[in-house]
Image (cartoon, rainbow, N blue to C red):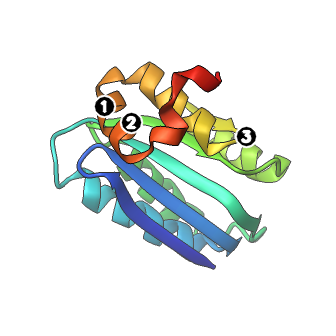
């Protein structure tokens, strides 16, 4: 599986992009990179998961103790903000994400499009609006919705 973790807005918004089949080891790598970025700042950090090109999640749920550990470390970051995803209708992926988030008492939502994710983030954290408008003006234009 290919994945990328990067700042969409430096020190405020992380974009995780997934493609192919998600293996548990991939999940660990993405979580560790997110933790690294979150611990580099005191700002509240929101995270977007782009699942548009994610084909499946490997059904083998080995490494369960490591999964629980890395998830708790990730979810326990004091500056973790909103977690949102877009680009999938896969019921298993949505269920798995919801289960992991509920176990960690963390809210997350899945939206059909990136544009809806951005509008939601602006709603929950208005401080993102000016930076998002500067970098994504077509997405943040309120006249379309």
**Vertical placement of residue 102 versus 88, above or below:** above
- In the image, taking residue 107 as reference, residue 125 lies left or right, namely left
Picture coordinates of residue 83, whole percent (x, y): 49, 39
Give the distance between the C-alpha atoms of the residues marked 1 and 2, in whole angstroms: 5 Å
Q: Residue at x 76, y 51 (%)?
A: 88
Name the secondary structure under disc 1.
Answer: helix
Tag nearer the camera, 2 or 3: 2
Q: Which residue is mark 1?
A: 130
Return the disc, 1 or 3, that comes first in the chain's sequence: 3
Name the secondary structure under disc 3.
Answer: loop
**Vertical placement of residue 104 versus 18, above or below:** above
Q: Quadrant of residue 110?
A: top right
- In the image, taking residue 109 as reference, residue 95 lies left or right, namely right
Q: Residue at x 43, y 61 (%)?
A: 31
Q: Would you call the spot at circle 1 few (<14 residues within 10 Å), some (14-19), or many (20 or more)?
A: few
Q: Which residue is mark 3?
A: 112
Q: Which residue is mark 2?
A: 133
- Toward the bottom, the furthest residue is 1
**Vertical placement of residue 142 versus 108, above or below:** above
- In the image, taking residue 88 as reference, residue 130 lies left or right, namely left
Q: Are marks 1 and 2 in contact (CB under 8 Å)?
A: yes
Return the disc, 2 or 3, that comes first in the chain's sequence: 3
Picture coordinates of residue 21, whole percent (x, y): 72, 74
């Amino acid at each position: 599986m290919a994945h990328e973790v990067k700042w969409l807005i430096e020190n405020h918004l992380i974009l995780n992009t997934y493609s192919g089949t998600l293996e548990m080891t991939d999940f660990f790598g993405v979580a560790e990179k997110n933790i690294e970025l979150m611990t580099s700042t005191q700002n509240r950090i929101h995270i977007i998961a782009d699942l548009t090109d994610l084909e499946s999640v490997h059904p083998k749920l080995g490494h369960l103790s490591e999964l629980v550990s890395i998830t708790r470390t990730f979810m326990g970051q004091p500056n973790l903000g909103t977690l949102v995803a877009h680009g999938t209708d896969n019921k298993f992926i949505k269920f798995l994400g919801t289960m992991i988030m509920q176990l960690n008492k963390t809210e997350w939502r899945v939206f059909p499009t990136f544009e809806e994710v951005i509008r939601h983030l602006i709603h929950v954290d208005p401080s993102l609006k000016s930076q998002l408008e500067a970098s994504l003006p077509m997405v943040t234009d309120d006249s379309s919705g």
